[in-house]
Image: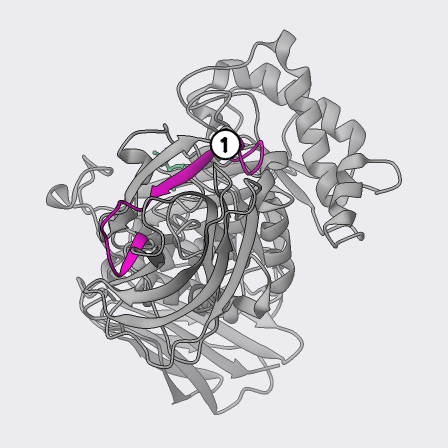
Amino acid sequence: VTVTVSATASHPIPTTLWGQMFEDISHSGDGGLYAELLQNRAFQQVTPNTAAALNAWHSINGAALSVVADTVPVSSALPNSLQLTIPAGRTGPVGVGNEGYFGIKVAAGSTYTASFHYRFPTASSFRGSVTVGLQTSAGKSLVSTSVPITAASTAWTLVNVTLHPTASAASTANNFTVTLDGAAASGQTVHFAIFSLFPPTFKNRPNGMRVDIATTLSEMAPSFFRLPGGNNLEGQTVAQRWQWNATVGPLLSRPGRVGDWGYVNTDGLGLMEYLNWCEDLNMQPIMAIWSGFALGGTSVAEADLEPYIQQAIDQINFVIGDPATSSAAALRASLGHPAPFTLNYVEVGNEDFFAPSTYTYRWHDFVTALTAEFPNIHFIATTDTFDPILSPNPLQYDVHVYQTPTWFAQNSFFYDGFERNATKYFEGEYAAISTNASDIFGTPADGRFTFPTMQSSTGEAAFMTGLERNSDIVFSASYAPLLNHVANSQWTPNLVSFDAGNVYPSTSFYVQKLFSLNRGDEYIPSTLPTPAGTLFWSVVRKTSTREIIIKISNTVGTAAPVTFVLPFATVATTGSAQVLTGAETASNTPTTPNLVVPKNSTIPTGKTFSYTAPAFSVSVLTLVAH
Ligand SMILES: O=S(=O)(O)O[C@H]1C[C@H](O)[C@@H](O)[C@@H]1CO
């Protein structure tokens, strides 16, 4: 095929085009990006005196454990404590262990910060010591330290220790342990609250992000970060919705919530952490507000919306308000960020095509009130586009699609036919997730991908060439879901997988990275691909370097020769090629983590040059031309 490139750009490409969608699903946050290593660290949202309340905790050497609703809770937000009784007649360390989020990585040279609160429910003359450590699941100590513990009062005492393992553990099958000497502490009962164990964090932020996952996500230079969901914004009930104010301030003040993906969210990764993260990666938030619909099916009646609208106003004021006039903004300032954060886009709900009939008043009442308060914010609607008709008329919609690789390859022209009527589109969630067109959301046995493959990733890349061509109306796009812990996932495939020890960037991640790191600031029209074909491309110009950047996706198993004809007076005779290619079913997985990674080379270029796109490949060709 011959591709003739135009001499003039059709439109500028928005700087917000490529980014990331985040929510706490498959332990993307707790047990993933959020660096806390202990699972169920504060016994949040559990039923006392049940085995489930002790999830991830186990007894060491006969300690009697139970989660109790403390008569003197460590804080009103954290009513539960771990009650530990040392039985008589024990010798050696007796206490409690935590298995982490399906393992704990212990690396020599890393400093681990551990903490917990303790109190004796009965004061006594007991004085002893408590040993805090990391050990293999077989009980071999990796590192430990001891600190005094006293029953002089029944008040809560905070213990902070640092741990410096001198050897790395052979695997992630390790436990965090807190023990007392069985003989010396025989018969003692101690209450513990909010344990914590942190490794070093990204940019050393307190209560921050896991370095390896954060670093991987930063590698694709995302321009935006959608938060906090996705379904996980919504709650199964109105009371279980995500509430910004429950996720900020001291961890002692954060009650956590029952997330929408089957596990308790600590909310240690809260709105302030999200906003600091956005600043650390130089990306802007696309922040959602709860819009009055819970996933169990409840829509708040219009007459009852006001408190939720006020909560949304406070949430946005926390992000951009003036501390002198808004208490929410003053709270932000008190947490270390007096200046407003960047915020241009607020999404009103999530996938409200599930509740369109009430979205008409919910959208209207939220956006009318919020626009009056924040006239510069762009509000994004989440129903199907123009169905139902909404007032005020949305200028942005969030469009989601999960489909087969073939669908993506054959729908790269999805936006070409959209009316240019000032409406802009956020392709907020897209991914090829199954080969089975009649059962997209089925199981792997039905064709569902566990990890992206070169078939799914080239399909997505084809679709993305269309998003780039239509970036006059598509302002943002993000693959979803972003992250999953391979030991506990509620959804596959995902862009980046991880376990307690490592991160596994997928083939689709490398596609996102290739598009995001090779952006143009203007789109250059060229011969259009055949919509129902198998080879797709987009041409952009990076004006600062006078480079032409050509992205090509070959979605099938035969190499595709393509000739480019450029109209420019000066065209470099060599250019660079960044190529991701592999077998149709090739995936990067924990056992084959780097099976398919981009490879760089130089290629001959010129006013007319030919290139052969390998089978199942995504190529980025870059050359200076003007
Ligand atoms: O069950 S779904 O609605 O398909 O869930 C999808 C859509 C929702 O926004 C997001 O949270 C989730 C996976 O990314």
Q: Is residue 12 visible in the rendered structure shown here?
A: no
Left or right, 508 with respect to 472, comes to left
508 is higher (above) or lower (below) than 230: below
Q: Residue at x 37, y 59 (%)?
A: 461
Q: Is residue 248 visible in the rendered structure shown here?
A: yes
Q: Secondary structure at mark 1?
A: loop
Left or right, 289 with respect to 369, comes to left
111 is higher (above) or lower (below) than 471: below
Q: Residue at x 35, y 76 (%)?
A: 598
Query: Which residue matches tag 1?
Result: 79
Q: Is mark 1 within 8 Å of ligand 1?
A: no
Quadrant that contains the C terminus: bottom right
Q: Which residues are magenta?
A: 72-96
Where residue 237 sits in the image (x, y, percent)? Answer: 45, 20
Left or right, 622 with respect to 615, comes to right
- Residue flagged by tag 1: what amino acid is it? Pro
The answer to which quarter of the image holds residue 261 is: top left
For the view shown, which residue lies furthest in the front direction? Answer: 125
Q: Residue at x 46, y 19 (%)?
A: 355
For the view shown, which residue lies furthest in the right direction? Answer: 324
Is residue 80 found inside the magenta-colored segment of the image? yes
What crowding class fits label 1: few (fewer than 14 Cα within 10 Å), some (14-19), or many (20 or more)?
A: many
Asked whether 285 or 167 is in front, the reply is: 167
Quadrant field for ligand 1: top left
Where residue 547 sits in the image (x, y, percent)? Answer: 57, 79
Asked whether 527 or 519 is in front, the reply is: 519
